[in-house]
Structure formats: C-alpha cells, structure tokens
Amino acid sequence: MLEIKDLRKKFGKFHALNGLDLHIPQGSLYGFVGPNGAGKTTTIKIMTGLLFADSGKVMIDGTDVSGGLNELKMKIGYVPDFFGVYDNLKVNEYMEFFASCYGIDGLKGRTRYMTLLEQVGLEDKVNFYVDSLSRGMKQRLCLARALIHDPLLLVLDEPTSGLDPRTRFEFKEILKELKEQGKTIFISSHVLSELSELCTDIGVIDQGKMILSGSMEEILRRVNATNPLIISVLGNKDKALTILKSQPCVQTIAVKDEDIRVNFIGDNQDEALLLQQLVDAEVLVHGFYREQGSLESLFMQITDHDKEKAVLVHEIESGL
Ligand SMILES: Nc1ncnc2c1ncn2[C@@H]1O[C@H](COP(=O)(O)OP(=O)(O)OP(=O)(O)O)[C@@H](O)[C@H]1O
C-alpha cells in the first residue's frame, strides 16, 4: 500500500530524514513511532504532498507521490496534529464544504457525510457550530472530514494528543472499526502503550532513519526473548544457583526472596533443558517464565544512543 525508499530531506545543513525506508501492508494499522524531532511529521508532510523530499521515493498504491497531486489527494485522507477546523461553520456546513472540494455535492454529499458523522458519533451535532464542540469532538470531526472521499490510506499525526483517557479510548475504537472495514491506517505517535494494543505493524524512526520495523506480534515476541527469566523455587535454592552458574546461557543472576532473576540468552529449547535440570536435581520449581516486555521499554532502549544498547538493536533486528 505504502512504500518509502531512501527518503532524504535536509533543512539547511540538518538531515531531518536520512535515508528512511518504510513499508506498510494493505489493511494494516501501522504505528509510526519516534522521539521528538525524529522526523515523523516531515515524513507525513512528504507523504501527503505538503513538502518535497530532496531525494527518495514514496509510492502510495502504485502512485508516485511526486507525480500528480490530484491522484494522491484521492487516495489519502489526512488528519494533522492540529485540528484545522473552521470554527465559524456549522458541522453540516463544514462537511458539505469538504465534500464539494472532492466533487461530492447535493444529496450524495449529505448522505455521505451523515454516514460518516454517525460513524464518529457526531450525528446529533449536525447543526452545532464547530466552535462549540469539545476537543475530542473536533478531532472526530476532522476524522470524518478526512474520510469524505473514501480514501484508501488514512494518515493521522498524533491523533490522541491532548484527549482525555475516555475520549482517547472512543477514538481508538473508531480506528479499529475503520480497520475492520478495510482501511489502511497510518498513525504517528509517541504514546506507545496505545499503539501496542491498537496496531498490527510498527516502525520506529530515530534521527531520520527507520531503526526497527515489523509486525507488532513479532516485535513483542523479540522483546520478550531479551527479558529476564524469573525462576521461583520453594526449596534447594543453593542447588538451583549452582546449576544456574554452570549454564553457558546464563549471564547474570539476582536473588530476591524465593525468586531468582536470570539474564538468559537461550531459546525455548535451552529454557526447557534448564527447567528439566532443576527438576531432576529435586529443586522445587513453582514458577518459570520470561518477564513480559513492553513496547515502551524497547523504545527507551533503542532510542537511547549509548553503544551498549545499540548492540541490542542489532540483535533484535537480526533476530538473535
Ligand atoms: N521547516 C523546518 N525548518 C527547519 N528545521 C525543521 C523544519 N521542520 C522540521 N525541522 C527539524 O527537523 C527535525 C524533524 O522534525 P519533525 O517535525 O519531522 O519531527 P517529529 O518526529 O515529528 O517530532 P515531534 O514528535 O516533536 O513532532 C527536527 O529537528 C525539526 O526541528
């Protein structure tokens, strides 16, 4: 659906995008994550035709973004990080205006925008001035507006920033529904906890480059594999520690009450063999699991530019 290859953009001497590659599968809900200043908005502006790249390629459903803006506008719906609504219009006038921009007039336009307003829960606000809507309602109105021409790709820049938890939840539910209807959705955000439960795929950008990308499931699986092994024992702790110290996969051991926390670099089979050894040595094991990783902790690790952590990124990317 969306393919970005070696995208570069400089502001003066500063490289905002430094050879960015990105691939979004059709029908996915893609989370685009990165710290402040990583290059997210610059990427979105180039994707939506608001800014020209210095070099590189952006293809949306087979259309080169640098080619025809009109064709691009029909394929993409954009919700910017600021509302951009016209406060002195009523909701219906606002929707009518954008429908007519895409040549959807009269009854067809009204039917279309009423369906969308219903979808975003604003059907009873049709005659309200945009000015009188809450922040969350304005955000939903922007979403309805971005969908007016039924685009293939919906792009949202920090869509839930400034919304309260309930409004954020409702907004996410609408996005899930749109995904089920077959839309491909691209969300830029640094609220990672939201993306992990919402997105099917994720890309992490830092200093204008993609540093990690893939399906959410795969990335979380890899995060978990780098987390410590927690072994809880009821007796024979000394024997357990002797066995652990003899294992080549064990890097560090920390003991707290009945829990032994082990940095263990082995795979599932190594874990199973370790458990078997402990049981054979009559250690009473009542807990044996990998601590669950979060996307948040991965993000902190890979956007922290110290050398040791860069090694971890390399390991994650190469599937070690
Ligand atoms: N028009 C511009 N002129 C000069 N520098 C710019 C311009 N636009 C962006 N930059 C710089 O390029 C870098 C990337 O900016 P961008 O807005 O794309 O980051 P971002 O990932 O969206 O950040 P944030 O999460 O804070 O919105 C930043 O260092 C920013 O200061």
Image (cartoon, grey):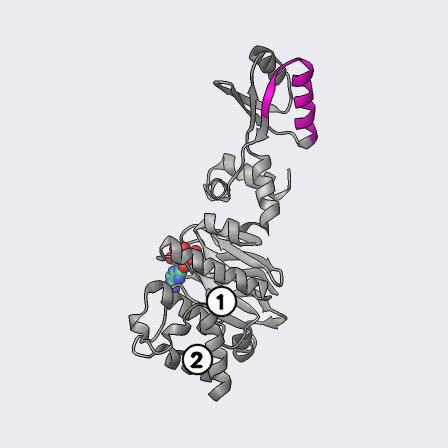
Asked if the stretch drawn in magenta spans residue 273, the answer is: yes
In the foreground, 137 or 315:
137
* Front label number (2 vs 1): 2
Instruction: From the image, give the main secondary structure of the stretch colored magenta.
Output: helix
In the foreground, 25 or 303:
25
Q: Is residue 74 above or below residue 28?
A: below
Q: Quadrant of residue 74?
A: bottom right
Asked if the stretch drawn in magenta spans residue 213, the answer is: no
Quadrant containing the N terminus in the rendered view: bottom right
Which region of the structure is painted magenta?
269-287
Residue located farthest toward the front when viewing the structure as drawn: 124
Disc 1 marks which residue? 46
Residue drawn at x 49%, y 72% as measured from the top left = 147
The disc labelled 2 sits on which kind of residue? Phe
Relative image position of residue 47 (x, y in whole percent): 51, 67
Of callouts 2 and 1, the N-terminal one: 1
C-beta proximity under 8 Å, tags 2 and 1: no
Relative image position of residue 245 (x, y in whole percent): 60, 16
The disc labelled 1 sits on which kind of residue? Ile
Q: Is residue 105 visible?
A: no
Disc 2 marks which residue? 98
Relative image position of residue 106 (x, y in whole percent): 47, 88
